[in-house]
Amino acid sequence: MLEKQVSTLVAILKSEDIRNYSKEAFWNLIKAVMMGDGLAAADSIRNIQEIIFHTPTILFWDKMKRYLLGTFKCYEDQLKMAQKFDNHNEKYEIFVKRQIHLINEIDDDLKVDFFANLTRCFLLTDLTQELFFKLTKFIVMCTPPELEYLKSVDYNIEAENSVMVSSLYQYTLFTQREKQNGDIKYMLSDFAKALKQNSLNYCEGLNGCSRYCSYEQLKPIDIVEPFPNTIDCGTYGTF
């Protein structure tokens, strides 16, 4: 069933201007996808509302509408996205299916907007699929306040440890550095900078910086080594 719905959505994205689906007209897109019929007309719209009108489905399609309209500003954008897959329909369908799974995981309108920014960046730049999906996972994992914090800070921040910083450190979005005077400071990792460039601060431009588009451009984060095992087995015996 899902495969047929994905195929229908892909067909619509390739052949119809998504901007035409606004307000009540979006129910027609829902009907087309749910019924697997890209040519579904606007009749019986009340019936389709009655069929799918329960909270999980409504929430999903509300996010989907926000996402699609935030990603594609015109029909030419939709064609550009299809062209990224060299008109390989199966690869495009796999991509759209992954999008659907990710949209289903997102739990906040702000996250949907950041996801739309990221997808638009993928559409218009050389951002690779691998880094695109990794950055999407950060959007899913972080809370809205965490994402707002990352959006607000400078790329070259040197922060003291805090609840916010330590939480984002666990996600590899901050890295730890020791200064010459012995102080420990926390700085954005390249993953965090890529997330800001390609999603959170995408609309603000790069301000002369180079865009992180692939894993090859990222530096590994500093991983704190675990303390060595100092137990003397000769003294305490083996376990």
Image (cartoon, rainbow, N blue to C red):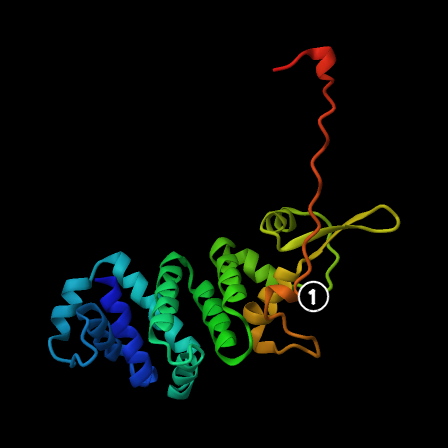
Q: Is residue 48 left or right of residue 24?
A: left
Q: Residues within 10 Å of mark 1 (few under 14, many from 20)?
A: some
Q: What is the secondary structure assignment of the residue under circle 1?
A: loop
Residue situated in front as seen by the camera: 162 or 206: 206
Provide the residue designation for mark 1: 155
Q: Is residue 97 left or right of residue 234?
A: left
x 85%, y 46%: residue: 182
Residue situated in front as seen by the camera: 100 or 199: 100
Q: Is residue 143 left or right of residue 188?
A: left
Quarter assignment of residue 217: bottom right
The quadrant in which the C terminus is found is top right
x 59%, y 71%: residue: 213
Task: List x then y, in percent, for residue 6.
Answer: 28, 69
Q: Can residue 22 be seen in the rendering of this structure? A: no
Up the image or down, 220 lies above or below 97; here it is above
Q: Is residue 196 left or right of residue 72?
A: right
Task: List x then y, in percent, for residue 46.
Answer: 13, 72
Task: List x then y, in percent, for residue 99.
Answer: 39, 65
Quarter assignment of residue 108: bottom left
Up the image or down, 17 lies above or below 237; here it is below
Question: Looking at the picture, which amino acid does disc 1 mark?
Answer: Tyr
Task: List x then y, in percent, for residue 39.
Answer: 18, 81
